[in-house]
Amino acid sequence: MSWRDVKPIDCDVHVVVPHTGVLLPYLDDYWRDYVTVRGVRNLDMTSYPPTAPLTSRPDWRPETGHAGTDLALLRRHVFDELGAQIAICNVIWGAQALHHHHLAAALCRAVNSWLAAEWLDQEPRLRASIVVPWQNAAHAVEEIERCAADKRFVQVLLLAMADQPLGREHYWPIYEAAVRHGLPVAIHAGSAYRHAPTSLGWPSTLLEDYVGQASAFQNQLMSLICEGALAKFPNLKVVLVESGVTWLPAFMWRANKIWRAMRMETPWVDRPPAAILRDQVRLTLQPFDAPPDAALVEQVIEQIDSDRTILFATDYPHWQFDEDEVIPPGLSADLARRVLVDNALGTYPRLESLS
C-alpha cells in the first residue's frame, strides 16, 4: 500500500500571522486603535530565527517573507505534492502569552476570524484549531462558543508550557466547553514564557529547549490525570502535537507503577494511567524520534498497545518532517491506514463527513 493512494489527513499544518497589520480589519475600533498606538507590530512566538533550517524545509520556503504565510504554497505542498485530503491549521502566535488578558482575548478573536476569512474560506480542504486566551478561562470559553458554530474549527489549541499545569480546575471550563461542542483539545509544543522550559532553570541553547519539550508534555499528562480533569471529562480527547512519540511507553510504565504505590492520593483515578491515556490521548506523528529501523519502530508501537493513538502530521512547513517519508517503517498496512486517516476520523467528530 502506498500512502499516496490513501490521501492522508494532516493533523498539524502551521499557518503564520505575518504581522499584526493583517489582523486590524478583524479588531473592533478600540482594539484597532490600541494596537496601532502602542505599536504592537508582531507577536511571533517562533523561538528560532525565521531563516533557521528548523523553520522550513528548503523547498517549502517562500522567496520572501515567513514560511507558512502563503496559501498558494501550502496548497501546492500539502495537497498537490503530499496528497492530503484535509489539513488542520495550527496558529502559534503571541496572543496566548500576553499578561493583558482582555487584549489577548481580542487578538485571539482576530486571529480566528482572519484564519476563517483568509484561509478556510479560500481553501475548502483546510480545517483549523481555535486559538483561545487561556490566561482567562471565561474569555477562552467565550471564544470557543463563538467559533464552534463554524464546523471548520475542529479543536481547541493550548500550549505545552502554561501559567500552571493544565489539569488544574482553572482550565476545566475550557474542557467542558470543548466536550460540549465535540472538540478535542490540542496541546502543542510551545510556551507562554512564564517559567523556564526546564525544571533546572533556563538553558543556553535552543537544542536544550526543544528536546526539553517532551518533559513538559509528560508533566501535563500527569497533571490531567492526577488533578482529575480526564476523569471529570471522560469524553474529552487530548491531542499532543509535536510532542514526539517514542517516550510514551516508558512514561506509561512509570506512571502505572507509581500510581499503584500512591493511588490513595488520587481516588478519582480508578484505573491505571496507561488505560486512561489509550482512551483519551492521541499524539501526532511528527517529529517521530526513533531510529530508522522497522523492527524497533514496530516494538514501540506494540509497547504503546493501541492502534488508535498516533495521528498523521507533517508539521508543515517546519523541518521535523523527514523529506517525503511521511510514515515510519515498521507499520503494517492496516496500522498505516489508521495512522494516515482512520485515527483522525475517530478523534475529530467534525471530520466524520469525510468517511
Image (tube, helix red, strand yellow):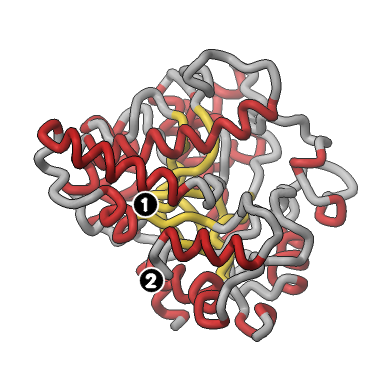
Count the numbered circles shown. 2
> Viewer-proximal residue, 313 or 43?
313
Where does residue 58 sit, x and y in percent of width and height? 86, 50
In screen coordinates, is 301 left or right of 69? left
Q: Quadrant of the C terminus?
A: bottom left
Looking at the image, which residue sits at the far top?
201
Q: Quadrant of the N terminus?
A: bottom right
Where does residue 143 sit, x and y in percent of width and height? 36, 43
Above-or-below relation of 313 to 259: below
Q: Are marks 1 and 2 in contact (CB under 8 Å)?
A: no
Tag 1: amino acid: Val
Instruction: Residue at 51% x, 59% y: name it.
Output: 300
In screen coordinates, is 97 left or right of 70? left
Local crowd size for mark 2, using a 10 Å CA cut-off: few (<14), some (14–19), many (≥20): some
Where does residue 17 sit, x and y in percent of width and height? 64, 41
Please tell me whether mark 1 sits on a helix, a strand or a loop. strand
Residue linked to disc 1: 238
Instruction: Residue at 77% x, 72% y: name it.
Output: 81
> Viewer-proximal residue, 176 or 323?
323
Please tell me whether mark 2 sits on a helix, a strand or a loop. helix
> Viewer-proximal residue, 218 or 174?
218
In 3D space, how far apart are the residues under numbered discs 1 and 2 (Cα atoms)? 12 Å
Residue linked to disc 2: 346
Where does residue 205 sit, x and y in percent of width and height? 70, 22
Instruction: Residue at 52% x, 63% y: name it.
Output: 299
